[in-house]
Image: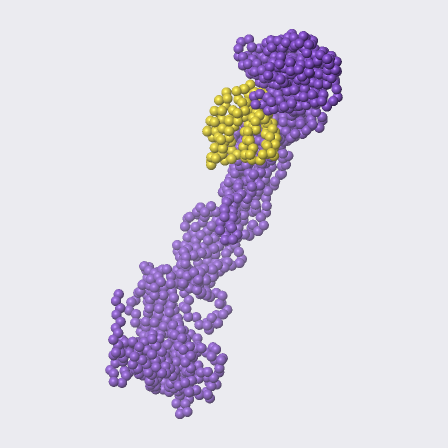
Chain colours: A yellow, B purple
């Protein structure tokens, strides 16, 4: 699981470099489906500061369309930004924020 | 003739329904006529493109229309509800070349009517009548011919009800004239227009029907396959129009609908797993299956995909094929799983494998090698997928092992291959069909290996080529697993290490753990004990593993460690994986001790093992640096820069988790920047800039963290044997933090650096090769050091003062009997005290021997010996001693100084200190110490608390001496026993006019004392006086009084002249009046006989034998009360005899009324130069006024300083340059104070206001 999560970074990098060349900072943060496999779908999202988010969805889950994934990422990004804005958070440390955990597990529950 | 429009796609395309086309021939019409025109019509119709305007707002397109002409038969007309679009007759044409009216009326019209009726019956409104006329026809029937136009008109009136364009005339089509050409072209245009019109109309109707059908899909009885055939018809039409995009859309819609359908209803059934077949444009076999409603899910998907693939390749988008293929394969697998279709195990893998290869084959078939290489990123997914599937097939069929497959495996293989069926005819003859490949791969272990490796390497190569290194490594890892199953750990390890490296460098802890476990297995198989143990250590400390697993790996190490010692193989492992040094603490915290002292080092080790581990020895090697000059540094011991007592070692906690923030990079270095405008320096902007962005912003995932635990392979650990070690035997490290205390060696002075840390567990030794940040402690050796300082500032001279002796013993041990020898000096005696005690404290400033060690102090004539109590090295010995600095009596004659020239060094010199008004004295001490052959020289600074001034006061002949004592210190004193004595003249009596015996002298205040000088015979011209007083700080008993002496000297004390003055009112007036001239009468009287010195000095003998001296007087009024009229100064010649008197009259005028003080009268010595005797200046005029004013000034100055001018010769005023300017110039010299007594000094005279002065000044406040 984390092995292909890892490999999905290949595609993330590929997409970032491809996008970076063409559009500069007007780029779309959502990278779309990165890496379809038999069992999972891996979606990617990269913030302007090159923080990468990856969402892995079970392939059998057809209720999640691109738009849902996109909004999930946006939510995740907002929550992540809040965590980073916390002056007591040390960038690089593992995130220990209840609010962030809540958002993430909320999304997990929602997607079933 | 009726034409059936048939759009053609490319010529090469051969469609199965071509054969079904049917022609339509007009019954009575001339078939030979159409046949003669057919070829050119069919050829020229598609030549020109037409703009196709489309419904639903779709963009118009230019299309070429091609038609198929078929003879008219009524049964071929489409029935109601017809779904076939491809065979649909779009336009019906009636051809005639009739030009005879009769013929028309009898035959043609009837035929046309029948034709029209049948068309109408089938609801077809798309028809046209073409009348062909030729000149031949005209000529043949010239006689009974109607004009040509009349036939056409007739037809139009009969059939073309307001639709004149439905009847077209074609003239002489077989002639090559411009007229016939023109008519031919207009016919073509007409046909195209009508054809397109009909096509658009019918297509629209078809689409509407199709949509209606689609909307019914929720109704029972609706068949997807039926609908499929309808929409595919539309797709075929678009395909033939070469509108591949639109055709593809149809299939995509079908695809999406099918997905929905599958999800909603399910579509099952048996199926084979022969894979996709993409070699035929249309797989009729499957299509028929669909048409019959017998297709399985995979069949339907396969057929759909083959169609999409064909269209995409037409559209030259082969890379979309690969992408869609991957999606399709994933999707199908998912769908089958979702539908819970039971399939033979491995069947899906076969299907996927075959399909992958088929797609790849299809793509390879339509692209050249360069294109393929450039687009690896599109195909590599399929390669990897195929590799994966082949691997799982191999595993299923027992092909991935050292041994041959079992019979069970073989049965499974046979079943799988049977499911494939026979090879398709298309590929039977090709050597490398997917079918053959799969069959071969499953045939034997060796063949499987060959195929699998080929695929794996191909996938890896491609991933590498497109820079997806992580993916390549994942394939590598899978390959490693394969090798492991094949019992080939050597090859496996390479791939695993590579994968591990990338996981470690990017901080992916779970894959790291997983890969590491595989590596451990690998290394164990390879028998690489050291590496295996190192990996085991890493895994034993890996929190991602279960405790059981960790214990297992830990036990592996302990088992090895516990092996008997005869196996002389020792293993050295990196310590970081076993236990981490987190903290190091020195006791004492300064980490700096003198040699021989106890220094403890406490290490905090975090043991990562899951169980407690017994360590035989824990040692830290030390690098020793002999400190240069470390042994003779006097102050080094105390001023040395000391380490912080505690060193924290930061490292990433474990191999798990991303690099912690401590490793996240250097701290920001921020600077303020200000941008100022160059013209007026005003601030434009200001901001903060980070100076080390290049370090801070450096990518962190691209460089591996420096700490060892994450290292892929254990670093080569070099053990350096140091001469000195910190050692502890037999420690048990519990999981978590352990504290271990070492006692550090501190024998030799120098710097000790901790280098490496070793932990020995049986045969295993864990080594921390570098302790970083470096940890040092210092051992120093210090020379004994003696300092003397005041107990309290400032030290006052003249009073007993406490000074503090501090002895830092350093390396010297003070033994019993050791003593300090102080050389005594006269000026600073040491006051013996019975209660002199010493205090000894250790280096930590704790008083250890506070036993009131009484020092025995013995003074002999030359030295004072202080015997010290025994003191250990590196201790501090402190004691206080009372000393007294004598105040120098102040008057030191130059002669004295010259006389004592040899010992001037020892005599303390006083000087004025800039920080204090007090005069300072530096007192030197010379001390002989037992540890050194040299004397220690020390200096103390004392301050004299007093400043003393003396002055001589006269009243006529009587003399008074005044002494002023000023207390400049901050202490209040009591002054007692104030005395003044004269040293040389015993007859002289000094009568004290001081009444008090004791006096308070507060800080910053002064006390004045006065004595009258009385003498019997003669007043000596020189007086040498000693002022003495006792003083003590206020409120202290009498024993505390200390003497204070002050010597001074007066010269020329005797009063020589008295000056009297009288102011005479103007004549006739009783009092002076302001503004009126008065007379000032000055009377100078000599009081004494000349003394011997005076005669020699400045007298000259007059012609009459009388000795005279010249005096100069001057009247000056500095307060502007008086105006001196006429001469203000003059010269008098005084006989040198007692009572000689000289009177002078001077006119002065009072300027104000009131009691005015007398004008000042000064008398000066006038010394004519000896060389200038001959030139006798006129006594009244020789001194110029300006020289007098100069004198005036100088005299004032002189007056201020007169009292302290107690020694040395009296210099003439202005003598310096005046004498050098002209030798003839006489000199003026003031008298010493007391030599001239001025009676008028404080006298006043009453001055009345002027009579006519009516103005009165009134000041009201």
Left or right: where B1215 falls relative to B731: left
Q: Can residue B341 be spotted in the picture?
A: no
Query: In x, y percent, where is residue B1196?
Result: 39, 74
Q: Nearer the viewer, residue B1072 or B715?
A: B1072
Quarter in which the C terminus of chain B is drawn: bottom left
Of residues B1074 and B999, the one nearer the viewer is B1074
For image coordinates 39% across by 86% down, the residue present is B1180
The residue sitting at the front extreme is B143
The N terminus of chain B sits in image quarter: top right
Q: Give the answer, above or below, for where B609 lies relative to B407.
A: below
Locate residue B789: give its quadrant: bottom left
Residue at the (47%, 84%) spot, across then down: B1224
Q: Is B954 situated above or below B968?
A: below
Question: Residue B884 vs residue B62: left or right?
Answer: left
Which residue is drawn at the image coordinates 53% and 57% (left, top)?
Answer: B933
Q: Residue at image x 63%, y 9%?
A: B113
Residue B624 location, quadrant: top right
Q: Nearer the viewer, residue B930 or A94?
A: A94
Question: How many numbered marks appear?
Answer: 0
| Residue B6 % position (x, y) | 67, 16
Tell whether B739 sits left or right of B252: left
The spot of residue B202 in percent (x, y) is: 60, 15
Given residues B1188 and B1122, the one toward you in this image is B1122
Query: Residue B212: which quarter of the image?
Result: top right
Q: Position of residue B544 (x, y in %)?
A: 55, 26
Residue A49 seen anywhere in this rendered image of the structure: yes
| Left or right, B464 with reference to B1094 | right
């Amino acid at each position: 699981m984390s092995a292909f999560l890892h490999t999905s970074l290949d595609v993330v990098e590929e997409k970032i470099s491809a996008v970076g060349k063409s559009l500069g900072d007007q780029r779309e943060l959502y990278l779309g489906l990165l890496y379809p496999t038999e069992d999972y779908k891996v979606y990617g999202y990269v913030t302007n500061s090159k923080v990468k988010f990856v969402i892995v969805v079970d392939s059998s889950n057809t209720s999640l369309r691109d738009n849902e994934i996109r909004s999930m990422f946006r939510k995740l990004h907002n929550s992540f930004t809040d965590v980073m804005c916390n002056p007591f958070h040390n960038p690089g440390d593992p995130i220990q924020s209840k609010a962030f955990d809540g958002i993430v597990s909320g999304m997990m529950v929602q997607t079933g | 003739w009726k034409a059936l429009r048939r759009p053609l796609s490319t010529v090469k395309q051969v469609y199965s329904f071509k054969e079904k086309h049917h022609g339509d021939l007009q019954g009575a019409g001339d078939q030979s006529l159409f046949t003669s025109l057919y070829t050119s019509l069919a050829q020229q119709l598609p030549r020109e493109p037409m703009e196709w305007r489309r419904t639903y707002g779709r963009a118009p397109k230019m299309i070429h229309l091609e038609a198929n002409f078929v003879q008219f038969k009524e049964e071929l007309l489409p029935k109601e509800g017809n779904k076939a679009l491809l065979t649909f007759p779009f336009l019906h044409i009636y051809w005639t070349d009739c030009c005879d009216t009769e013929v028309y009326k009898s035959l043609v019209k009837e035929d046309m009517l029948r034709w029209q009726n049948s068309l109408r019956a089938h609801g077809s409104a798309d028809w046209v009548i073409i009348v062909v006329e030729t000149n031949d026809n005209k000529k043949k029937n010239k006689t009974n011919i109607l004009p040509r136009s009349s036939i056409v008109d007739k037809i139009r009136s009969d059939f073309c009800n307001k639709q004149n364009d439905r009847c077209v005339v074609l003239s002489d089509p077989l002639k090559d004239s411009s007229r016939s050409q023109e008519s031919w072209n207009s016919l073509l245009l007409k046909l195209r227009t009508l054809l397109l019109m009909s096509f658009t109309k019918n297509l629209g109707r078809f689409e509407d029907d199709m949509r209606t059908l689609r909307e019914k899909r929720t109704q029972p009885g609706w068949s997807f396959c039926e609908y499929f055939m309808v929409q595919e018809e539309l797709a075929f039409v678009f395909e033939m129009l070469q509108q591949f995009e639109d055709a593809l859309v149809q299939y995509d819609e079908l695809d999406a609908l099918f997905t929905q359908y599958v999800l909603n209803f399910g579509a099952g059934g048996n199926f084979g797993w022969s894979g996709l077949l993409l070699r035929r444009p249309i797989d009729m076999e499957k299509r028929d299956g669909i048409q019959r409603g017998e297709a399985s899910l995979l069949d339907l998907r396969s057929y759909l995909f083959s169609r999409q693939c064909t269209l995409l390749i037409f559209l030259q988008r082969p890379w979309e094929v690969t992408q869609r293929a991957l999606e399709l394969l994933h999707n199908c697998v998912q769908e089958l799983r979702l539908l819970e279709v039971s399939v033979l195990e491995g069947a899906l893998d076969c299907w996927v494998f075959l399909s992958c290869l088929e797609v790849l084959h299809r793509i390879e078939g339509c692209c050249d090698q360069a294109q393929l290489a450039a687009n690896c990123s599109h195909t590599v997914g399929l390669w990897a997928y195929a590799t994966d599937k082949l691997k799982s097939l191999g595993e299923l069929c027992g092909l991935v092992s050292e041994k041959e497959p079992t019979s069970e495996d073989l049965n499974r293989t046979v079943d799988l291959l049977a499911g494939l069926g026979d090879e398709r005819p298309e590929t039977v003859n090709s050597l490398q069909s997917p079918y053959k490949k799969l069959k071969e791969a499953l045939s034997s272990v060796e063949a499987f290996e060959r195929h699998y490796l080929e695929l794996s390497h191909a996938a890896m190569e491609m991933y590498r080529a497109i820079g997806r290194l992580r993916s390549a490594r994942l394939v590598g890892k899978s390959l490693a697993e394969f090798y492991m199953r094949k019992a080939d750990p050597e090859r496996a390890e390479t791939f695993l290490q590579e994968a591990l490296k990338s996981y470690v460098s990017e901080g992916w802890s779970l894959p790291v753990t997983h890969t590491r476990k595989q590596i451990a297995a690998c290394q164990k198989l390879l028998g690489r004990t050291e590496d295996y143990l190192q990996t085991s250590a890493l895994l034993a400390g890996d929190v991602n593993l279960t405790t059981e697993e960790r214990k297992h790996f830990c036990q592996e190490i302990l088992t090895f460690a516990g092996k008997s010692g005869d196996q002389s193989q020792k293993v050295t492992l990196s310590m970081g994986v076993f236990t981490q040094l987190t903290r190091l603490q020195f006791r004492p915290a300064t980490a700096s001790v003198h040699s021989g002292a106890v220094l403890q080092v406490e290490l905090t080790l975090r043991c990562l093992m899951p169980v407690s581990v017994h360590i035989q020895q824990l040692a830290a090697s030390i690098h020793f640096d002999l400190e240069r000059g470390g042994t003779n540094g006097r102050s080094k011991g105390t001023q040395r820069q000391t380490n912080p007592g505690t060193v924290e070692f930061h490292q990433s906690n474990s191999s798990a988790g991303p690099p912690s923030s401590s490793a996240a990079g250097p701290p920001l270095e921020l600077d303020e920047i200000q941008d100022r405008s160059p013209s007026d320096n005003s601030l434009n902007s200001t901001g903060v800039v980070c100076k080390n962005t290049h370090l801070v912003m450096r990518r962190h995932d691209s460089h591996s963290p420096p700490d060892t635990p994450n290292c892929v392979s254990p670093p080569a650990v070099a053990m350096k044997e140091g001469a000195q070690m910190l050692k502890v035997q037999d420690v048990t490290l519990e999981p978590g933090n352990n504290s271990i205390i070492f006692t550090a060696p501190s024998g030799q002075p120098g710097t000790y650096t901790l280098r490496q840390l070793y932990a020995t567990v049986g045969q295993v030794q864990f080594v921390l090769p570098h302790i970083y940040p470096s940890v040092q402690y210092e051992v120093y050796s210090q020379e004994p050091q003696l300092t003397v300082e005041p107990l309290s500032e400032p030290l006052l001279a003249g009073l007993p003062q406490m000074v503090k002796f501090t002895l830092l013993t350093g390396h010297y041990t003070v033994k019993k009997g050791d003593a300090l020898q102080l050389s005594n000096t006269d000026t600073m005696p040491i006051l013996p005290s019975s209660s002199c005690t010493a205090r000894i404290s250790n280096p930590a400033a704790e008083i250890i021997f506070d036993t009131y060690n009484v020092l025995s102090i013995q003074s002999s004539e030359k030295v004072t010996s202080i015997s010290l109590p025994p003191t250990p090295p590196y201790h501090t010995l402190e004691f206080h001693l009372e000393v007294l600095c004598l105040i120098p009596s102040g008057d030191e004659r130059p002669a004295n100084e010259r006389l004592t020239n040899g010992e001037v060094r020892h005599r303390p010199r006083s000087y004025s200190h800039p920080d204090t008004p007090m005069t300072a004295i530096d007192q030197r001490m010379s001390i002989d110490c037992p540890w050194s052959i040299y004397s220690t020289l020390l200096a103390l600074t004392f301050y004299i608390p007093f400043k003393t001034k003396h002055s001589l006061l006269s009243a006529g002949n009587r003399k008074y001496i005044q002494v002023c004592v000023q207390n400049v210190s901050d202490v209040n004193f009591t002054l007692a026993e104030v005395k003044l004595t004269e040293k040389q003249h015993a007859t002289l009596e000094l009568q004290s006019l001081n009444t008090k015996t004791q006096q308070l002298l507060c800080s910053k205040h002064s006390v004045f004392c006065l004595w009258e000088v009385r003498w019997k015979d003669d007043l000596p011209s020189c007086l040498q006086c000693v002022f003495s007083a006792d003083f003590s700080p206020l409120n202290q008993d009498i024993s505390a009084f200390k003497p204070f002496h002050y010597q001074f000297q007066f010269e020329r004390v005797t009063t020589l002249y008295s000056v009297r003055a009288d102011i005479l009112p103007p004549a006739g007036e009783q009092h002076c009046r302001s503004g009126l001239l008065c007379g000032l009468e000055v009377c100078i009287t000599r009081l004494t006989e000349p003394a011997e010195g005076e005669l020699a000095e400045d007298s000259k003998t007059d012609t009459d034998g009388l000795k005279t001296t010249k005096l100069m007087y001057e009247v000056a009024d500095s307060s502007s009360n008086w105006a001196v009229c006429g001469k203000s100064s003059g010269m008098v010649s005084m006989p040198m005899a007692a009572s000689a008197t000289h009177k002078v009259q001077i006119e002065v005028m009072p300027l104000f009324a009131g009691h005015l003080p007398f004008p000042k009268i000064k008398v000066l010595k006038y010394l004519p130069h000896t060389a200038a005797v001959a030139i006798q200046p006129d006594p009244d005029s020789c001194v110029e006024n300006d020289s007098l004013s100069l004198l005036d000034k100088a005299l004032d100055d002189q007056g201020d300083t007169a009292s302290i001018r107690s020694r040395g010769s009296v210099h003439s005023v202005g003598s310096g340059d005046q004498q050098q300017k002209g030798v003839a110039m006489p000199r003026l010299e003031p008298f010493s104070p007391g030599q001239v007594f001025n009676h008028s000094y404080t006298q006043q005279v009453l001055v009345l206001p002027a009579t006519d002065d009516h103005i009165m000044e009134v000041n009201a406040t």
